[in-house]
Image (cartoon, rainbow, N blue to C red):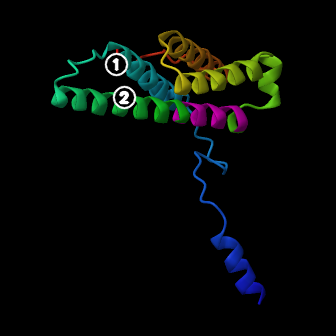
Amino acid sequence: MIKRALNRLGENLPTVEAHCDGPCGIYDPASARITAEAVQSMTKKILGLHLPDPTDAGAVARYHNTLSRYIAVKEEQAQETKDHLLVLWTDYFKPKHLAEYPDLHDTFWQAAKLCSACKVEVSVQHAGELMEAVEKIHNIFWATKGREVPWVLAAG
């Protein structure tokens, strides 16, 4: 009876994916940089699209297809950026880091809010601010490890 109840309980639990709930010790803000860079790229691509002649059904369909794909990628990558940042914030950084970087919590909170803004809006400004926030986190992260790791962008 207990076994059957436990099996039923397990059937109703959601599946959760995370970078690391175990003590793997493998953290790197590069994942957040790559996804934030994709958000910035998709934002620029969305704003760079030109409306086709409304009488050209094929061109209109291609436009909507491209636009919807850009939007989907932008939103997915913004969420992934937030997920990567939250793993760093909650799993890697410890109270000793707060003593060294008293604005650490606010830095992460603002970065997470920018991820949300990038999902809701199509703003080059917010996408750029997200990149700046991720770069700041990159620099703090590597400083806590006593290493200088250059900030290198994939797109440029």
Give coordinates of residue 53: x percent, y percent: 20, 18
Kindly identify the residue that appears in the image at 50 percent across and 14 percent down. 123
Q: Position of residue 77 (x, y in %)?
A: 47, 32
Query: In the rendered view, would you say 14 is above or below 23?
Result: below
- Give the magenta part as a residue range: 80-90
Amino acid type shown at disc 2: Tyr
User: How far separated are the C-alphas under marks 1 and 2?
Assistant: 7 Å
- Residue 100 lies in the magenta stretch: no
Count of number-bearing discs: 2
Residue reaching furthest to the top = 125
Dominant SS type (magenta): helix
The amino acid type of the residue labelled 1 equals Lys
Q: Nearer the viewer, residue 14 or 108?
A: 14
Which of disc 2 and disc 1 is earlier in sequence?
A: 1
- Residue appearing at x 63%, y 72% in the figure: 11
Dot 1 lies on which element? Answer: helix
Please state if 124 lies on the left or on the right of 129 as rendered: left
The residue that disc 1 covers is 45
Give the residue number, with chain letter if any, for mark 2. 70
Occupied quadrant, residue 62:
top left
Extreme-front residue of the structure: 55
Residue 145 in sight from this viewpoint? no
Give x and y (percent) for residue 127. Answer: 51, 16
Please indicate whether residue 33 sits to the left or right of residue 56 in the image: right
Q: Do residues under tags 1 and 2 come within 8 Å of each other at their CB atoms?
A: yes
Q: Would you place residue 99 above or below residue 66 in this image?
A: above
Task: Give the numbered dot on residue 22.
Answer: none
In the displayed structure image, the side of residue 130 where residue 91 appears, left or right: right
